[in-house]
Amino acid sequence: TDSDGVEGWGEAAPAKIYGESTETVLAALTLYGQHLPEDPFAIESIERTWETALALHPSARCALSAALHDLVGKKMGIPVYQMWGLDPAKAPRSTFTIGIDTVEKLKVKVKEAEQYPILKIKLGTDRDVEILQTIRSLTDKELRVDANTGWNVKQAIRMLPVLEEFKVTVLEQPLPARDLEGLAAVTRASRIPVIADESCLVAADIPPLVGKVDGINIKLAKCGSLREAQRMIAIARAHQMMVMVGCMIESSIAITAAAHFTPLVDIVDLDGAALLASDPFKGATIDGGQVRLPTAPGLGLSRQ
Ligand code: MG
């Protein structure tokens, strides 16, 4: 809340694999939430300060960054996408994720995902072929695959013809995060575009990936700020890379913060709030897959 009583909203979705927990986020926010800037419009310098002070707390910073953008948009009386000069009609359709499960439960999940035109299938098990086969037998929708670092180079290359057979259009993170040479080998062998997720957290991770993967997956909980996300988009574009935006399991606050820059990306995977049993907030939606941005000032959020 600023001195005029305007509130900015943000959300942190800490991930253990990136070294965060509810406790670390609360500690970081308690420490820095009290030292908010005099001038909220100085977004660049504020985010730089947080980047230095909270280097290892990307999801905590992401909450502050989203709240700052929300606040500034509200003070200007325009939605965040308009602050950035973006056309909300350019937002692509979002995938809906089908998690690893038994054949019986996969059938239920595919049915539940009826309204979503593109499915993202989680693989990285010893039953990957069966999972793909099951889902493909139930639907002719576009399928994208996320192996979540679950394969080695040999397994990944062996899976490529299978992915082609089942008409998979995108392959996300086939190998462990640090195996960039392996990723290069898989990308060379693959006709399906390969996207780096766990291998690409922040803008500085992109140059080493150039020529080794076809694109990157940006998540606010990894990169820590809305401005860093935009830098990542610019750097990836300069290298003719595809840009995807993904999410954690999070409410409509964090999803909406990411949704505001979707007009700049090729692939959207913002089903985090749709996967929740109950979402306390309203913001961007992915009804029928299409990303729809709220038009109210700031992030355009409200309570359910
Ligand atoms: Mg992923």
Image (cartoon, helix red, strand yellow):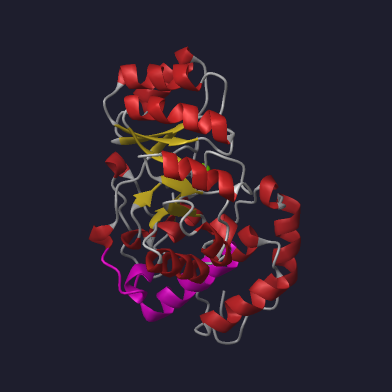
List x then y, in percent, for residue 196: 50, 49
Q: Nearer the viewer, residue 4 or 159?
A: 159
The answer to if 65 sits in the magenta stretch is yes
Residue depicted at x 23% and y 59%: 89
Expressed as whole percent of the image width and height from the top left, the position of residue 302 reads: 43, 57
* Residue at 58% from the left image edge and 51% from the top image edge: 199
In the image, 165 versus 190, the foreground residue is 190
Tell me if I can see residue 104 in this picture.
yes
Residue 249 seen anywhere in this rendered image of the structure:
no
Q: How many marks?
A: 0
Q: Position of residue 291 (x, y in %)?
A: 32, 51
Q: Is residue 72 magenta?
A: yes
x then y, percent, for residue 148: 55, 38
Name the residue at the top extreme.
Answer: 104
Residue numbers of the magenta segment: 62-87
Q: Which residue is at the front of the view, 46 or 37?
A: 46
> Which is the main secondary structure of the residues drawn in magenta?
helix
Position of 57 compared to 275: left or right?
right
Q: Quadrant of residue 165?
A: top left
Q: Is residue 71 above or below residue 266?
A: below
Which residue is outermost to the left? 89
Residue drawn at x 59%, y 68% is: 64
Q: Is residue 50 left or right of residue 200?
A: right
* Quarter of the image with the N terminus in it: bottom right
Of the pair 53 and 120, the residue shown nearer to us: 120
- Answer left or right for 137 relative to 41: left
